[in-house]
């Protein structure tokens, strides 16, 4: 059977979940496939000594980075993130610059993308990272095409993911590619996660992306909008529910959430429609009505404008019903 060596890089200040999330996915895939050697996983640091995660957790690598590649490049090289990426060890960056191009697949989790960018490995590529670090990466590494929205991005042999748990989504996608959907689904079930959030799913839900209003009536209204995307969500109707004049409501909503009521409603409806297309088999017309678009044509225009794809095409790519 095919062996796929996986090497996970460790360093002081690493985010422990960036390490253990993908590690558990690859390890679980071996068990789920009936081939314990489907992935051989090792961890390595520069000198082979223990590292201290940002949380304080002590982690003991299997070997040194030099020894890890002495017998050949890994099939998959995983570079996690964490506070240790803020001022990375030049020796670690140098090792990545020299050896990472030889890996069959190069994977970063969270701010591990900053290490790859510092090594020049993301130049000319589309990539993502934790939302907090996206502006920093775009500013410091202008040759990188930074996409702040998706939970992971795959660009050829290079894959980058957003914060922390997005590394699990990316690892599940890689397992599905290697061993098939059934194996990846079994691993996802054991880890009690979805198989799988599509890579272009936003890092933030609408509620997280927008600020939460300070005043309770507006805060409650935000939640009500999320629960009733099919309702009358015009400024006039929302203002009446908040017991404010339309003009006062529109100003207050934008001041407290950082976005206009119309944009907030548009994002809620799009997110609701995407979730229904991903997780259910409801028809496009029914999804359009349930999400507040009224007609499939209105929903198609919204999808094309924001996502660059029609709802039917989106479903074909990302439909993954929850079992």
Image (cartoon, grey):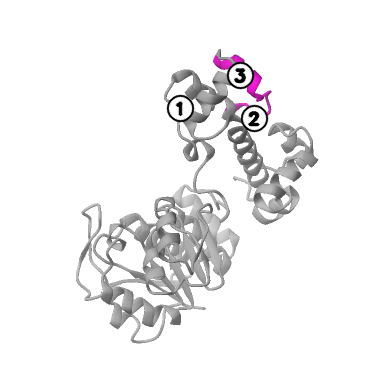
Q: What residue is at 55 percent from the left and 19 percent from the top?
A: 248
State yes or no: discs 2 and 3 in contact (Cβ < 8 Å).
no
> Tag count in the figure?
3
Observer-nearest of 5 and 118: 118
Between disc 3 and disc 1, the foreground one is 3
Q: Which residue is mark 2?
A: 229
Mark 2 is surrounded, within 10 Å at the Cα level, by few (under 14), some (14 to 19) or many (20 or more) other residues, namely many
Q: What residue is at 51 percent from the left and 78 percent from the top?
A: 2
Disc sitting over residue 124 in the figure: none
Disc 2 or 3, which lies upstream in sequence?
A: 2
172 in relation to 143, above or below:
above
236 in relation to 309, above or below:
above
Q: Which residue is mark 1?
A: 213
User: Bounds of the magenta span?
Assistant: 227-242
Disc 3 or 1, which lies upstream in sequence?
A: 1
Q: CA distance from mark 2 to mark 3?
A: 19 Å
Between disc 2 and disc 3, the foreground one is 3
259 in relation to 43, above or below:
above
Q: What residue is at 79 percent from the left and 36 percent from the top?
A: 295
Q: Where, by quadrant of the figure, is residue 230 drawn?
A: top right
Give the SS element for disc 2. loop
Q: Which residue is mark 3?
A: 246
């Amino acid at each position: 059977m095919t062996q796929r060596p996986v090497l996970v890089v460790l360093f002081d200040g690493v985010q422990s979940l960036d390490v253990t999330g993908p590690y558990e996915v690859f390890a679980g895939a071996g068990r789920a496939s009936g081939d314990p050697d489907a992935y051989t996983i090792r961890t390595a640091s520069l000198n082979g000594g223990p590292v201290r995660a940002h949380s304080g957790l002590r982690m003991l690598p299997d070997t040194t980075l030099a020894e890890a590649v002495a017998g050949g490049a890994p099939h998959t090289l995983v570079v996690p993130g964490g506070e240790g990426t803020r001022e990375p060890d030049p020796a670690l960056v140098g090792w990545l610059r020299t050896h990472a191009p030889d890996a069959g697949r190069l994977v970063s989790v969270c701010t591990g993308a900053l290490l790859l960018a510092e090594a020049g490995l993301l130049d000319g590529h589309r990539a993502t990272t934790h939302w907090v670090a996206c502006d920093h990466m775009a500013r410091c590494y202008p040759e990188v095409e930074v996409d702040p929205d998706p939970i992971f991005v795959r660009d050829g042999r290079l894959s980058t993911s957003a914060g922390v748990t997005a590394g699990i989504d990316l690892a599940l996608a890689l397992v599905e590619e290697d061993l098939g959907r059934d194996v990846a689904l079994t691993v996802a079930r054991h880890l009690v996660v979805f198989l799988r959030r599509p890579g272009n799913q936003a890092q933030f839900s609408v509620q997280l992306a927008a600020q939460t209003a300070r005043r309770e009536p507006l805060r409650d209204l935000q939640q009500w909008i999320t629960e009733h995307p099919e309702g009358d969500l015009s400024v006039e109707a929302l203002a009446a529910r908040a017991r404010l004049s339309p003009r006062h409501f529109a100003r207050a909503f934008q001041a407290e959430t950082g976005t206009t009521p119309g944009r907030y409603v548009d994002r809620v409806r799009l997110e609701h429609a995407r979730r229904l297309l991903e997780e259910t088999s409801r028809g496009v017309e029914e999804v359009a009505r349930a999400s507040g678009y009224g007609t499939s044509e209105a929903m198609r225009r919204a999808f094309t404008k924001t996502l660059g794809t029609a709802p039917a095409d989106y479903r074909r790519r990302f439909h993954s019903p929850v079992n």
